[in-house]
Amino acid sequence: MTAADVETPAPPAKRPRKPRQRHVVRRVRERASYDRSDAYAILDAGLVGHVGFAVDGQPFVIPMLYARDGDRILLHGAIASRLQQQLAGGVECCLSVTHVDGLVLARSHFHHSVNYRSVVAFGKATAVVDPAAKAAALWHFVDAVIPGRAADARPADRSELAATSVLLLDIVDVSAKVRSGGPKDHPDDLSLPVWAGVLPLATKRGTPVAAEDLAPGIGFPDYLASRATG
Amino acid sequence: MTAADVETPAPPAKRPRKPRQRHVVRRVRERASYDRSDAYAILDAGLVGHVGFAVDGQPFVIPMLYARDGDRILLHGAIASRLQQQLAGGVECCLSVTHVDGLVLARSHFHHSVNYRSVVAFGKATAVVDPAAKAAALWHFVDAVIPGRAADARPADRSELAATSVLLLDIVDVSAKVRSGGPKDHPDDLSLPVWAGVLPLATKRGTPVAAEDLAPGIGFPDYLASRATG
């Protein structure tokens, strides 16, 4: 995702047969995968994705909570009304999810890089309107973030479902891209007196903060204690 | 960014005067800011953004390293050739940056939420072609991630600059959106026997991993030790 992404020239144009055009990775192709299980593992490790759509050529990218449900992505969140307006016939969307795993420090500016796992998924989003499907989606959202939570908290009632916007994105095309490991310096730079290596980065959970209005005697549930990150 | 985003109905349409249409936040407007200093603080705390652009109505969202330079964003990374091809006259882009600060656990599914800080910026991206400007951009990238690093590592040489793609995004319109604090439960739910509160999330740095080919005697520099996250 940095200069290191340009360090290895792409091989002569030889397009893979199966992947469709829009999701074919063009840079540093050896880091790419079109295997859904690779992409789904990266999606399932995430919480917030960035959803892109275009209105009259103007691109919009909105952060949204997501949860995978088979070959579909449930989307929920700051659904701008501009997106809602586009939904009648389904709107082409691009969901991108990225985990940054570390800073890769090379001896040269050029070979500095980032370790990451990313997914880019394409498909049409449609609004979920059926109340039962919406309720199921909310349940799935809550449990995808914290398994066990959905059964503990109160499910949505009718008026809440009416006020809830849920989108469904069918994953038509998907690709994953991963960089891992240490810096790949130019051989001439290995003797430079510069520290090189990786500074790992990870999302960590801090100390839980109970709600100010939490009733006395309600303990911290086991299903929360077991999960380190979102 | 979740059901909580729909819990507070938007006030009757009363558009702010200054912000232009495309970056006006439509949902939970009290969380929005059009103050550049708010947006820039969120941008400066980040590393990887999601850049959206459209080609013939097809949206693409690509994770890219970025660094702010005044009212401009330097972009660098997996610049798909499809984006490069669009650049001749400048291409409309939307950059979205999101920090997830915590999981907000309410007593009901509906009021579950996420604490976050996000920015959506709009402007046209153009390619940086001047080698000196490219070199300065690379220097700025390295130092934006780890202050002090650029002076330590070897700057790019001519052939590396020729192989480097840098984009410049002028920030024309920008908005920030922030949610913080605990759950906002329905009053009727406060007596439910369900733990409620926030599980804070933050990006933390792990133990540095030296490159396998690091020459003996090269110590870990002070400027790296002082920085907790990317």
Image (tube, coloured by chain):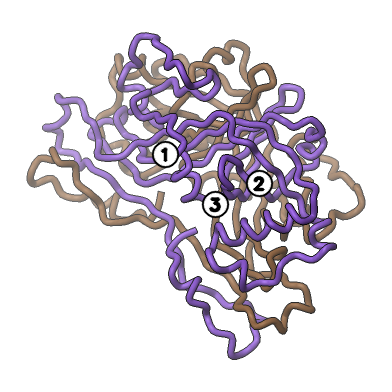
Chain colours: A purple, B brown
Q: Which disc, if any, is residue A38?
A: 1
Helix, strand or loop at label 3? It is loop
- Residue at 53%, 25% (x, y): give it: B168
The answer to which of marks 1 and 3 sits earlier in the sequence is: 1
Residue at mark 2: chain: A
- The amino acid at mark 3 is Leu
Q: Dot 2, crowdedness within 10 Å: few (<14), some or many (≥20)?
A: many
- The amino acid at mark 2 is Leu
Residue at mark 1: chain: A
Above or below, B8 against B52 in this view is below
Separation (CA) of disc 2 from disc 3 = 10 Å
Separation (CA) of disc 1 from disc 2 = 20 Å
- Viewer-nearest of labels 1 and 2? 1
**CB atoms of marks 1 and 3 within 8 Å:** no
Q: Dot 1, crowdedness within 10 Å: few (<14), some or many (≥20)?
A: some
* Horizontal side of residue B181 vs A199, given as left or right: right
Residue A80 spot, x, y in % from top left = 76, 43
The image quarter containing residue A71 is: top right
- Report which residue position mark 2 lands on: A75
**CB atoms of marks 2 and 3 within 8 Å:** no
Residue at mark 3: chain: A
Q: Which disc, if any, is residue B130?
A: none
